[in-house]
Image (cartoon, grey):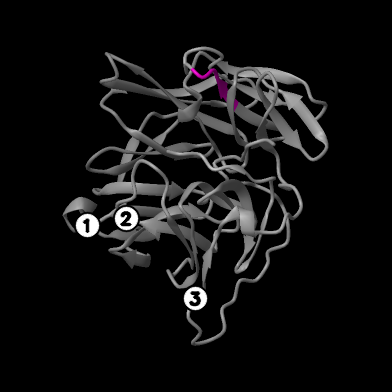
């Protein structure tokens, strides 16, 4: 029995998109997910992390590679290899980003950094990460090569900012009152919108932000990153949790979700049309195995598993284990 973790489950498998069309006028279905009631399907088809005897293991089909540290997450594909962030349970040791090469070799890319801050560009070529100083009051943001960690640009130290996305030329960041881009080589910054950000996706030209504090009536807006006045969707109930690998679908959940994962996740089109709702006790992660096929980290009433869903057709992609209590 192993717990499986994928890359925040926003995965880059290259497969043919499957249609999730809902018949005209039909209500979007609701699917209750309890792993003990689901059939066992195929194993997770994309690289992911499983718990091993002595630490975490990178799994890619039949290939199993031991990793440093006892807690790891797949960051994403980079060339012929995969980048993985690792640390120990105490979060202070084995803090690094490693590359798992095609031949199973594990090579350090970054060391002594918080791997939870690391993001990777869609093309796999550029990393961004952060270091904190001044007892956490200041942050420095770095951009570097995913091949060897060579630093390409540095911003800070300064007030706290969130890392939203990165590509070869820029990093998208936010603070409490604006979303902005930082050009890596020139160091120049440019404000995109003066709002509190939700998420950004450079590859698919998407940005979500809040019209105002959602605890005081703020709503979510999903817009074009390059043209924030071009709106895709607005919701005063949900916020965007993830974008599909092909940029055509969203996963959303309640706008005030915090702490333990949500009990409901909704699959939508980019325009916000609801395709399906998935419910359980709580979800620990969510994303896509491929366009059209979801992978959901389900904690049910009795059992937990990674569940694969294509609209309403759902099955376990890992062996169910005892559900964890948050």
Q: Are marks 1 and 2 in contact (CB under 8 Å)?
A: yes
Distance Cα–Cα, label 3 vs label 1:
26 Å
Of the image marks 3 and 2, the number of the one nearer the N terminus: 3
Observer able to see residue 169: yes
Vertical relation: 96 (above or below) 43: above
Locate residue 15 relative to residue 110 in the image: left or right: right
Residue 134 drawn at (x, y percent): 27, 13
User: Which residue is pictured at 37% across the width and 54% down the height?
Assistant: 208
Observer able to see residue 225: no
Label number found at residue 28: 3
Vertical relation: 119 (above or below) 241: above
Q: Quadrant of residue 314?
A: bottom right
Question: In the rendered view of the protein, which quadrant contains the C terminus?
Answer: top left
Residue 100 drawn at (x, y percent): 72, 26
Label number found at residue 255: 2
Q: Main secondary structure of the magenta part?
A: strand
Question: Which range is magenta?
Answer: 85-89
Question: How many other residues sit within 10 Å of disc 1, few (<14), some (14-19) or many (≥20)?
Answer: some
Of the image marks 1 and 2, the number of the one nearer the N terminus: 1
Q: Quadrant of residue 147?
A: top right
Label number found at residue 218: 1
Q: Which of the pair 90/273 is nearer the observer?
A: 90
- What secondary structure is marked by label 1? loop
């Amino acid at each position: 029995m192993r717990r499986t973790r994928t890359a925040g489950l926003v995965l880059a498998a290259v497969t043919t998109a499957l249609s999730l069309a809902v018949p005209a006028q039909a209500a979007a279905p609701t699917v209750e997910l309890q792993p003990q009631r689901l059939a066992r399907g195929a194993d997770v088809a994309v690289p992911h992390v499983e718990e091993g005897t002595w630490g975490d293991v990178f799994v890619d089909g039949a290939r199993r590679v031991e990793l440093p540290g006892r807690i790891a997450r797949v960051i994403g594909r980079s060339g012929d290899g995969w980048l993985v962030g690792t640390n120990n349970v105490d979060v202070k040791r084995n803090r690094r980003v490693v590359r798992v090469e095609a031949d199973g070799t594990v090579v350090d890319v970054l060391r002594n950094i918080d791997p939870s801050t690391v993001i990777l560009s869609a093309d796999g070529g550029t990393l961004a990460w952060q270091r904190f100083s001044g007892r956490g009051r200041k942050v420095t943001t770095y951009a570097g090569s995913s091949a060897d960690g060579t630093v390409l640009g540095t911003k800070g130290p300064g007030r706290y900012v969130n890392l939203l996305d990165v590509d070869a030329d820029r990093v998208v960041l936010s603070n409490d009152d604006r979303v902005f881009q930082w050009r890596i080589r020139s160091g120049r910054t440019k404000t995109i919108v003066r709002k509190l950000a939700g998420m950004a996706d450079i590859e698919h030209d998407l940005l979500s932000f809040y019209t105002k504090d959602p605890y005081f009536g703020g709503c979510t807006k999903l817009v074009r990153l390059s043209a924030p006045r071009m709106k895709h969707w607005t919701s005063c109930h949900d916020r965007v949790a993830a974008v599909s690998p092909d940029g055509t679908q969203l996963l959303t959940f309640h706008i005030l979700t915090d702490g333990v994962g949500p009990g409901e996740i909704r699959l939508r089109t980019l325009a916000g049309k609801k395709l399906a709702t998935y419910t359980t006790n709580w979800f620990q992660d969510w994303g896509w195995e491929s366009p059209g096929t979801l992978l959901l980290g389900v904690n049910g009433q009795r059992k937990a598993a990674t569940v694969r869903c294509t609209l309403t057709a759902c099955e376990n992609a890992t062996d169910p284990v005892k559900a964890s209590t948050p």
